[in-house]
Image (cartoon, grey):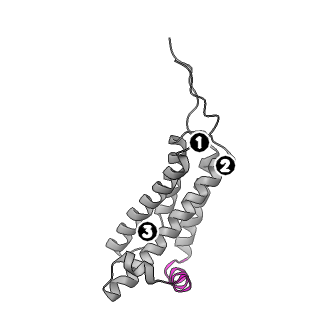
Amino acid sequence: MTAFHASKPRWFALPLLALGSLGFASAWLLLALRFDRQFAWLAPLAAVDMVLLLAAAHWPAGRTRAAWAVAGTVATIAAANFGVIAGQVGMGMGMRPWESALRLGPAYAWELGRLANGPGDLAWYALGIGVALVAGYRPWSTPRESIR
């Protein structure tokens, strides 16, 4: 057997990251709508998920993995917040979250997001972005020589 060398990223890493981001945001949305809370503490967990998805796709540790992990984390935070806002607005109008999301304008969503997220929530989001940045640089696994 030969040792695995993570010299170049795999082609499926970025689609996997996008699917992981949407999946995590969906779970976040369901929790937030069920318990009527923002659940901003999920941001660091989303960051770890993004880093692990990239590591599972054999994206080498370093600057690019950290950048993609941060991008995935920010996308997850934004999608979850937009979904929670759309769900909350939609509940008042008898619509489902995806129906409300199609009618929700960016300025209105931004204002509701600004009102819904306090300093504690913003600190959790910043922590999540920091976790993605730091963990993206860390090599999660090293190539091993085969044992004979």
Main SS type for the magenta part? helix
Q: Residues within 10 Å of mark 3 (few under 14, many from 20)?
A: some
For label 3, the residue is: 39
For numbered disc 2, what is the local secondary structure?
A: helix
116 part of magenta stretch: yes
Residue at x 57% of width, y 64% of height: 74
For numbered disc 3, what is the local secondary structure?
A: loop
Magenta-colored span: 105-118
For label 1, the residue is: 59
User: Measured along the vertical axis of the image, is residue 105 above or below residue 58?
Assistant: below
Question: Which of the 4 image quarters holds residue 89?
Answer: bottom left
Residue at x 53% of width, y 78% of height: 118
Question: Which of the 4 image quarters holds residue 39?
Answer: bottom left
The answer to whether mark 3 and mark 2 are in CB contact below 8 A is: no
109 part of magenta stretch: yes
Query: Which residue type carries mark 1?
Result: Trp
Q: Is residue 69 left or right of residue 32?
A: right
The spot of residue 145 in percent (x, y) is: 56, 20
Q: Residue furthest front?
A: 11
For label 2, the residue is: 64
Query: Which residue type carries mark 3?
Result: Phe
Q: Is residue 49 left or right of residue 87?
A: right
The answer to whether mark 2 and mark 1 are in CB contact below 8 A is: yes
C-alpha distance separating marks 3 and 2: 28 Å
Work out whether mark 3 precedes mark 1 in sequence or the reverse, and give the earlier one: 3
Q: Residue furthest bottom?
A: 93
